[in-house]
Image (tube, helix red, strand yellow):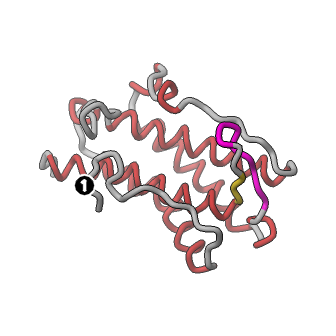
Amino acid sequence: MSTDPRYPIGKFAAQKSYTSSDLSGFLERIESLPARLEIAVTGLSDVQLDSPYREGGWTIRQVVHHVADSHMNAYVRVKWCMTEEKPVIKAYNEKTWATTPETSSDPYISLTFLKALHAKWVILLRSLSATDRSRQFVHPETRRSFNLDQLIAMYAWHGDHHLAHITEVKKRLQWN
């Protein structure tokens, strides 16, 4: 664990390649994330849900809604990658997305959405061959290319990263 509350599990660092064992572990983490997130927020009061996980950070409620938004975008990126040749993906401003009106709503809306999204996403990801997973997309801001193996690794990290935001604030504030 990192001492930086912005990166409680450390920063993501993409590797050039991953083993089939790595990918299997990433897919298990992606698949189990909705249930792990639900466990993390179950029983939290509105005051707790509206507490930032760190000074200047998003509230726990916003974190849950952000994960749904982000993983929805990742799912679409996989679909573009599978249906277009090296697409330039659409970026989005996650900070402004975290302040749209529905991000103050019940986080269980996003948890329900994540359950369905991840079920569908994991079916797609598990069906990909090594050749499929080598397909690339281009990020419009950095102009860097990423393959689907790297996307899978990054989103396994991303889910755990935001889950740790919640679990670490619960530990720190003794919300057990």
At x 32%, y 54%, the residue is 8
Give the image location of residue 69, x and y in percent. Answer: 55, 37
| Quarter where residue 125 is shown | bottom right
For the N terminus, the image quarter is bottom left
User: Of residues 155 and 5, which is closer to you in this image?
Assistant: 5
Give the image location of residue 101, x and y in percent. Answer: 46, 19
Say whether residue 122 is left or right of residue 10: right
Q: Amino acid at mark 1?
A: Thr
| Quarter where residue 11 is shown | bottom left
**Of helix, strand and loop, which mostly describes the magenta segment?**
loop
Q: Secondary structure beneath disc 1?
A: loop
User: Of residues 159 and 38, which is closer to you in this image?
Assistant: 159
Which residue has dot 1 on it? 3
Q: How many C-alpha atoms fall within 10 Å of the one at disc 1: few (<14), some, or many (≥20)?
A: few
Range of the magenta residues?
135-142
The residue most toward the left is 174
Give the image location of residue 87, x and y in percent. Answer: 80, 45
Q: Is residue 141 highlighted in magenta?
A: yes
At x 74%, y 65%, the residue is 133
At x 31%, y 51%, the residue is 40
- Above or below, comparing residue 38 to residue 130 in the picture: above
At x 38%, y 58%, the residue is 10
